[in-house]
Amino acid sequence: MKRRQLVKRNARRLAQSLLETVVGALVLIPLALMSVDAMAVINANHSNQELAQTAARAAANNITADAAQKIAEQTVSNFAKTNLIPNVSIASFQFDPAQKLVTVSVSMTVTIPVPLPWTSSVKLTASSTQPIVALPPSV
Amino acid sequence: MRHNQLAKRVPSTQDRKHRHHCRKTQLGATSAMVAACAFVLVLVIVAVIQVSMKLSSSQMVRNSVDAGVLNIATHVPDLKSGAGGAVFGDCNDITGAVGLTNINRVWGKALLINANAEEMANSGQAGNSAGSASQAMSGAEDLTNNLKEKLTDKESMDKLFAVQDEKKAIAVVKKGSGSEDSEQANFNTAYLHRGDESNISIDPAQFPPGTGDKLSPVSKGSSQWLGGYKNLQVNGKQFMFVPFRLGEMPHLVSPEEFKSNQEKPEGAIASLPPNSYYGSGTLSGTGGQASANAIANPQHTYQLAIPHAYVVIKLEKNQANWTINGTQIATSTYEFAHEQQWQIKDHSVGCLSKLNGYASLGNEYNQKDLLSVLTALPGDHEPAFVKLLQRLKEIDAGMTMTGMKALLSAQQVVPNEYEYVLYPTYKTADNTQPTIKLSPQSQVSEPWYKAASPDGTEKTIVAEQQTQDNPNTNWAQIIGIWMLTSHHVTENGNVMWTPGTGLNQCLGTLRLQRTADVTFGGHCPP
């Protein structure tokens, strides 16, 4: 009788632990997976900012809008795409010779490593404005 | 034995309470561990996000400060000190002002004026050239002082530093982040690329002999350039130009290079314009800070020149001295066309005789061009042409001896015009790409032209060889028995050079003066 009670008690304890583990896993695993997603997006955002700046700097070395845009597009197209970042493009390009400023906005699609129920990718946009160093002053 | 052991295991009331407590603790252990892990995980995630944000913001501030400082370096040539005034107005840019781009041009003109003054002093023709040289120096220094104020004005720098509009990321960089030490301090500046080329190209032949030898120009590309941030000595004065490397755009420079060049070059005037700029910025809210240094480059070059200047060729009226047997009877002048003169009229020569003396004069000028006139009499005229060419090269470095002589050949000598001006015309508003023209003074229509005398003193540089009866001749009519034994027209001339510094536009006057001796010889019959 006592042994049966002992077995019963152990089984209940095991079940409870199992239940707690399952519930814990239900909390921890999504958290861990979300952290992976967050890291991926943060990294991609960083890359996007760098890319926007690099493209703007490259564009700033040209005196015509056409040449500047071409080199900016070339810079963006040279970006090594991955499974995580399948698509990068120039969202907007502004060449202002009067102010001697060029602004390049780069749009980056980031595939979320662990898809969320409501989305599997996010779109990041970064822009950089650089002085057009190639334009000589009005003299 | 076994019974005893079992008996021992019978729990007491106290044991039962303890076991119940332990069971409850065990039951919550996994939950607590899960909660702790979740808490730690959340903390880690937040920390990672914070660090990433921090990294991202510091990258942002770095990028922003880089862009801001680069924008300063790109736009500083747009900060102008105002017009060049009476002395350096010809060095203005197309906006009618002097800035970092053309400040070297101003100093280039001052350098040439001083080189001229040095040569004039060396040749004993100084005149008022020392005053002109000093005036050029003080004028250039005044302009440079004004420019330096603009180039280090904190408000202007702040505006340039805030390169983007307020909504964008860069706007979070605090403006006015000049010196880290003081809010009141100006943006830090430096003097980079010492000894490298400035944006003034030169031809050594532009300098008067013996004055440009110590300039040690920098050879770059296919041209020679005045060196920047190094002492150039001319006329006992120090000149320093701002270096701008050929083919370079404004760009960022390392902090080490910047810091090691913050001291002014030795011998520099207090207002020597810097070519490099420092700025720092702080990202609001995050405390992220960054600094950057950039060097300016206007990407515009000039040829060393005194843009508004000219050289004058002055033809004096010729003098004819009429003599009979060595006694001067009359004097006359003749100009730049053939004429027949009769200056000795019924002059008694003894033995009841009279002499009428005639001469055909001005044949050296008749229908002649300026080059032929200048070389009408034999002699080595090259020193005169060399002087002319050197001064013309100060206006247009591309002028050649062939080109100059072609201009002289193309200009006919015009009656009643005694001065001919070699001057430049410009199609550009900033007085670049000159075309040298030659016109009688009355026909010079350039608005900037102001007739002036050179500030040096005159010296003969060509003594022409005497000619006889070529191209002018004379003859006589004798009334009576007086015997004419000889009649000649001998002619000689000098070419004089009065150098000018160019401060008052005049770079020199070449003056041609010739004298014809119309002689008659004879005697009464024995």
Image: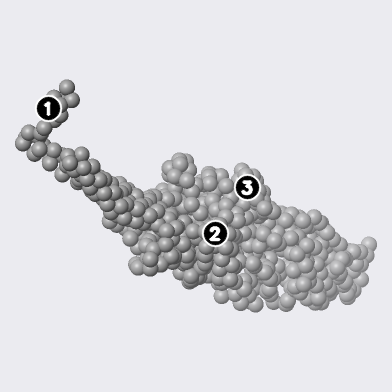
* Between B482 and B69, the one nearer to me in the picture: B69
Give the foreground label among 1 and 2.
Answer: 1
Of mark 1 and mark 3, the one earlier in the sequence is 1
* Between B147 and B173, the one nearer to me in the picture: B173
Measuring from the top left, give residue B12's x and y in whole percent. Answer: 7, 33
Q: Which quadrant: the C terminus of chain B?
A: bottom right
At numbered mark 3, what does the secondary structure look like: helix, strand or loop?
Answer: strand
Instruction: Name the residue: 44% across, 65% down.
Output: A121
Q: Hey, what amino acid is under mark 1?
A: Lys
Measuring from the top left, give residue B214's x and y in whole percent. Answer: 61, 43
Q: Hey, what amino acid is under mark 2?
A: Lys
Q: Name the chain letter of the residue that bears numbered label 2.
A: A
Instruction: Name the residue: 8% across, 39% down.
Output: B17
B213 vs B133, left or right, is right
* Between A34 and B472, the one nearer to me in the picture: A34
Image disc number at residue B378: none
Q: In the rendered image, is residue B215 in sight?
A: yes
- CA separation in Å, label 1 and label 2: 74 Å
Q: Which quadrant: the N terminus of chain B?
A: top left
Measuring from the top left, give residue B407's x and y in whole percent. Answer: 74, 69
Which residue position holds label 3?
B218
B388 vs B295, left or right, is right
Check whether the beta carbons of the residues at disc 2 and disc 3 lie within 8 A of each other.
no
Which residue position holds label 2?
A81
Check whether the beta carbons of the residues at disc 1 and disc 2 lie within 8 A of each other.
no
Which residue position holds label 1?
B8
